Amino acid sequence: MSDSKKKIRILNNIHSYAAKPANVITVLFFIILLATVCFPLISLVRDAFTVHFGEIRDIGKPVGSFTLYHWQTLLFDNLYNYSVLTFWHPLLNSFSMAIVSCIVAVGFGGAVAWFITRSDIQGKKFLSTIFVFPYIMPSWSIAMFWENFFKNTRIVACYNQMGMLESLTGICVPEWVLYGFFPCAMCLGIHYAPFAYLLIGGILRNMDANLEEAATVLKASRFKILRKITLPIVTPALISTVLLVFSSSISSYTVPAFLNKNGSFSTISTTMRSLFNTAAMQGQGFVVAIVLLVFSVLILTINNRMTGKRKSFTTISGKSGQVSLVKLGRARKPITAVILVISIFFAIVPLVSFALESLLEVPGDYSTLSLYYWLTTDTLENRVFGSSQGILRNPTIWMALGRSLLVSLMVALISGTFGILIGYACARKRGSRLARWVSNMAFFPYLIPAMSFGAVYLSVSFLPSFSFLRGSVFLLIIVGGIKFLPFASKSGANAMMQVSGEIEEAAFVIGVPWWKRMVRILFPIQKASFISGYLLPFISCMRELSLFVLLAAPGSIITVVLQDFEVNGLTQISNGINFLIIMIVLLVQFITNKLTGASIDKGIGG
């Protein structure tokens, strides 16, 4: 074959390949994800082995030189017990905190899931709705509420401020209840308990009731049915819940940051933040980021391996719709009351707490209710950002809120649109190697802890070619768009998998262009899933702090402003800002429900 014929054949193959939109989208996003996921990770690893500007004096090498100094110092330096105090002890604290939070989340969330799906407990629908509320709220909101409720005048770190408990009852809890290991583990456990409830409850709800009914006919006790049938079936969900909660808790930054005002409890994530804030220790911060990343990937790999081995517990036969509910008898009302009180305490009372705390001129003194910290133009003590006005008159707060809304909107547009396109391409190219690579790369940001992912892009901003990104809103949009892409891409892929290719082929035969097939046919069919793919990243980004804490300039976005006010002692303003954020998140959640007709607890709570 002549060279000209070979060229013509190659061009024809390229044209034939490019004529299919799914092929073009797959190649395009392979390149985009390679640049936005793989390249930053390479940059992160590079920064963990190179000298930075602030380290020249300590290391004695020029900037950019290869070094093992960060690893040796952080992991093995025994001078003044540095490595133990800076790395190993915080890592042990994080491990302990994650283990206890797993016990709380799985124990409480799993128990509630069982009561709602397998017993005759009262008010199932209402309990199901309010129980998931702490998961909708940011985790640091639970931490702020914990402090609002338990702070008291006997604890030095509270600066003589009374909390709700002391104000109403006079009871002062010891310091370990308010700050340190115990409250951090409890708040994370409470935040992730609804997550355990959703996973375990979904399995219990869809479980074949014939299995339990057969055991009942054979005179098996309820305990034996639970141990021999129910628990083995929910084991995959239990394993997934434990590992995912552990992975999220060990890398949590916001809860330990809010509940460590006495400096008694350092975790690996708060240590990473302090290392990045010190010019001479930034390289060690990148080492911590890599360690957290490796832990998360290892944990999720174990999760996939272990749950994959339990597929034999899946029941394929038709399900019985008649579920034999356990009669709780005299315990029905007390159990209902306990779950109801705990759910309301962590779902409704926090909102009341944030609103009240923002209205108190004197913290803890409910006779000083006023709109002072919302409307004042007076000079406030401990001024932040050189600004002294109340919440509604403070330009820093309004500009930060506007930027947060802008960042969240752009992140939602990027993640949602990219997710739909990736979902479409992967569904149409299902089975191809390139589609698998794109799907895996799109999901990979989910495996990386939020703060480590921020560190990944912080390392990129240190490169001379990308220094203009440092501290910019544009960088936050890029980071948020990639970090929250897994939500949208999985939503898009699941939606497209449900749509038969014959529908699109029929439109293609009559000459309907690809963009019109997407807009007029595919999008209307799966509107609910696609809209969720836009709104879920918006909600997640609006309340995010850990992802942006290393990247955002002071006063740039509302969550960073909230933390700065909290640290500087203006708790009335920080509580007011928190109340605003949660109300915005709830409003968007409400709109999501109305537009899609879906709810994250639908199908579990009756």
Image (tube, rainbow, N blue to C red):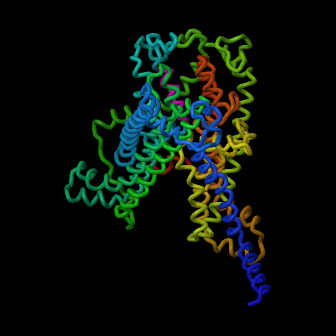
Residue 363 in the figure: left or right of residue 474? left
User: What is the quadrant of the N terminus in the image?
Assistant: bottom right
Decide which of 526, 414 is in the foreground and name it.
414
Rendering coords of residue 413 (x, y %): 71, 49
79 versus 568 height, above or below: below
**Could you tell me if residue 587 is visible in this image?**
no
Residue at x-position 70% and y-position 35%: 471
The answer to if 145 sits in the magenta stretch is yes
Q: How many marks?
A: 0
Bounds of the magenta segment: 137-149
Q: Which of the pair 316/461 is nearer the observer?
A: 461
Between 259 and 325, the residue placed more toward the observer is 259
The image quadrant that residue 319 belongs to is bottom left
Percent from the top left, x then y, of residue 47?
60, 43
> In x, y percent, where is residue 315?
37, 64
Q: Residue at x 45, y 37 (%)?
A: 75
**Residue furthest out toward the bottom:** 1
Residue 434 x, y percent position in the rendering = 61, 67
Q: Quadrant of residue 89?
A: top left
For the point 40% across and 37% down, which residue is it?
Answer: 95
Q: Is residue 296 left or right of residue 47?
A: left
Q: Is residue 239 visible?
A: yes
| Residue situated furthest front in the rendering | 60
> Magenta residues: mostly which secondary structure?
helix
